[in-house]
């Protein structure tokens, strides 16, 4: 990946700052579950047994899902790295995983396409994406948000495409509609960002995916917002919503109950949680987000589809 001198120096300083401030970070973020590093996922999925006549999805970890959408295989925001953070000197410098990915790259069938919500380091992971591009050179299409493809366009994809808010396209028989959310876009602090009012800055998407009359919302990352309400008659079957890193980041991340309410406002049938139990990104305890979701679910229309990393939901 090409990098100019200014960014090289800045990333070096960021890497050094991470090493120096590791103790401070341990107080800011939730602590790891094991002194020996990431633990094994509680459930091991078996995508080789999935049926192409159904919609099947499994939670790999964080916002990474493998989805078989009636025979179309896609990955959302794949992050298989042991750490998330600045990619420098051939590795990521940042927080370590709580739990290992439920599937390794060798256990994941070749994706028809990869769907990326935005360029944040925990959603657009360069080492993971590089590994897929090298394993399947020129064989995977990528869809990402406006002004973000430059991060990965040096890799050997079949195609890499951007889609802006309120636009639609189709890949491998799946209709993809980009939906605006309440978040921010910069990957590094000096970059232009739409959330700061710059129309040409890095953007951030939710997506509505449709095939054979079924619809999946992949929310990416969002704070609580009314922006989903216009989709309440769209027949969303599955709402995949972020529920973690809300403490103290409420301006950019919703709480579990807020995520349920947004899915409820869309009249979604099923609710799939994500963006929790994987990386130490907030102060909330490891169990809190899922427990909060479970305790609040009876007040809202959507049924909870899964609760554990590695678990599979079938529609």
Image (cartoon, rainbow, N blue to C red):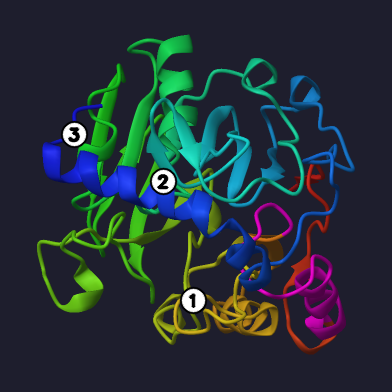
Q: Is residue 93 magenta?
A: no
What's the residue at 83%, 40% (across, down)? 41
Q: Is residue 69 visible?
A: no
- Find the magenta span and give its range: 277-297
Question: Label 1: which residue?
Answer: 233
Along the polypeptide, which appears first: circle 3 or circle 2?
3
Relative vertical location of residue 24 with respect to residue 3 in this rendering, above or below: below
Please identify the quarter of the rendering in which residue 133 is found.
top left
Please identify the quarter of the rendering in which residue 28 is found.
bottom right
Give neighbour class at mark 3: few <14, some 14-19, many 20+ (Cα, 10 Å): few
The mark found on residue 15 in the picture is: 2
What's the residue at 50%, 79% (across, down)? 232
Relative vertical location of residue 196 with respect to residue 152 in this rendering, above or below: below
Secondary structure beneath label 1: loop
Q: CA distance from mark 3 to mark 1?
A: 45 Å
Along the polypeptide, which appears first: circle 2 or circle 1?
2
Secondary structure beneath label 3: loop
Secondary structure beneath label 2: helix
The answer to whether 95 appears left or right of 56 in the picture is left
Q: Which quadrant, please, contains the N terminus?
A: top left
The answer to whether 237 appears left or right of 38 in the picture is left
Q: CA distance from mark 2 to mark 1?
A: 47 Å
Q: Position of residue 21 (x, y in %)?
A: 53, 60
Q: CA distance from mark 3 to mark 2?
A: 15 Å
- Which one is in front in this view, the residue at disc 3 or the one at disc 1? 3
The mark found on residue 108 in the picture is: none
Q: Is residue 192 visible?
A: yes
Question: Label 3: which residue?
Answer: 3
What's the residue at 52%, 34% (across, down)? 74
The answer to whether 194 appears left or right of 273 in the picture is left
């Amino acid at each position: 990946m090409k990098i100019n001198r200014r960014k090289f120096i800045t990333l070096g300083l960021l890497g050094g700052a991470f090493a120096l401030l590791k103790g401070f970070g341990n107080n800011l973020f939730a602590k790891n579950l094991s002194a020996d590093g990431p633990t094994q996922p509680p459930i091991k999925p078996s995508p080789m047994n999935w049926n192409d006549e159904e919609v099947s999805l499994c939670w790999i970890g964080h916002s990474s899902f493998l989805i078989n959408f009636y025979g179309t295989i896609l990955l959302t925001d794949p992050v298989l790295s042991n750490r998330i953070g600045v990619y420098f000197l051939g590795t990521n410098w940042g927080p370590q995983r709580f739990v290992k990915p439920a599937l390794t790259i060798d256990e994941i069938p070749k994706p028809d396409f990869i769907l990326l919500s935005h360029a944040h380091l925990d959603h657009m992971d360069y080492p993971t994406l590089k590994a897929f591009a090298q394993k399947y050179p020129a064989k995977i299409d990528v869809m990402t948000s406006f002004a973000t493809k430059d991060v990965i366009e040096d890799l050997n994809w079949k195609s890499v495409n951007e889609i802006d808010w309120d636009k639609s396209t189709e890949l491998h028989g799946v209709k993809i509609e980009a939906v605006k959310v309440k978040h921010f876009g910069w990957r590094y602090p000096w970059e232009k960002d739409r959330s700061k009012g710059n129309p040409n800055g890095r953007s951030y998407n939710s997506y509505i995916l449709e095939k054979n009359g079924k619809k999946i919302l992949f929310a990416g990352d969002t704070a609580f917002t009314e922006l989903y309400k216009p989709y309440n008659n769209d027949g969303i079957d599955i709402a995949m919503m972020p529920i973690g890193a809300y403490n103290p980041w409420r301006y950019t991340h919703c709480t579990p109950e807020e995520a349920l309410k947004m899915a409820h406002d869309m009249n979604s049938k099923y609710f799939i949680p994500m963006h929790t139990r994987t990386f130490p990104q907030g102060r909330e305890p490891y169990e809190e987000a899922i427990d909060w979701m479970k305790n609040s679910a009876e007040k809202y229309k959507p049924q909870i589809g899964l609760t554990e990393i590695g678990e599979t939901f079938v529609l």
